[in-house]
Image (spheres, rainbow, N blue to C red):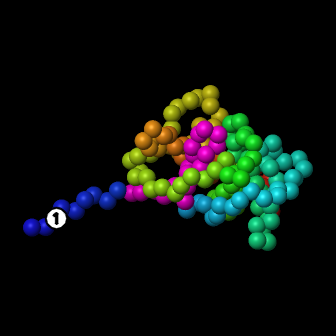
Amino acid sequence: MSERARPITAERQLVVFSLGREEFAVDVNQVREIIRMEEITRMPKSPPFVEGIINLRGQIIAVIDLAKRLNLPSTERTDAHRIVVVETEDLKVGMIVDSVSEVTSVAEEEIEPPPTLASDATTPFILGVVKRDKRLIILLDLSKLLSLEEIAELSF
């Protein structure tokens, strides 16, 4: 007697991190590394959410405060804070997050479309929402997190 093949469900690996009391995630394929906070050199005339630049093994990358970029309150920096180095569309950038909690797999059907909030400026950054137990994890679209003008300013 042959076993019936289960349908293959597409899964996505996500890096989950927090900003304040909220949880966010990005696709693990876009994450290059996660590093501890380090000294950030300020850049003059940069947008308010740009913290500055760091030297990452000889490569200069811009670092943004993701909470400021998403119009969320920033928290006081602690030892738990991390810089998540991501790469999208030929841009490598560090994002300051409060903490990184896990790498998890989610089935594509677990990702629900983002709520439609016409007045919310962050909606274009949101790919979807994942419900896990009593948690809501907001999946970010890194390609829309920075405008083309902002990308040009951050390129070194």
Residue 98 on the magenta segment: no
Helix, strand or loop at mark 1:
loop
Residue 55 percent location from the top left of the image: 80, 65
Image check: 59 left or right of 80?
right
Task: Give the quarter of the figure containing the N terminus.
Answer: bottom left
Write down the region rendered in magenta.
Answer: 10-28
Q: Which is more toward the observer, 58 or 100?
A: 100
Position of residue 50 in the picture relative to residue 72 (left or right): right
Residue 59 to residue 27: above or below = below
The residue under label 1 is 3
Counting from the top left corner in percent of width and height, residue 90 is at 68, 63
Identified by mark 1, the residue type is Glu
Magenta stretch: includes residue 23: yes
Q: Is residue 38 left or right of residue 30?
A: right
Q: Which residue is at 76% across, 71% downward? A: 57
| Coordinates of residue 107 in the picture (x, y in percent) | 40, 52
Residue 23 visible, this angle? yes
Residue drawn at point x = 41 percent, y = 46 percent: 110
Q: Name the quadrant of the C terminus.
A: bottom right
The x and y percentages for residue 154 are 78, 55
Farthest residue toward the left?
1
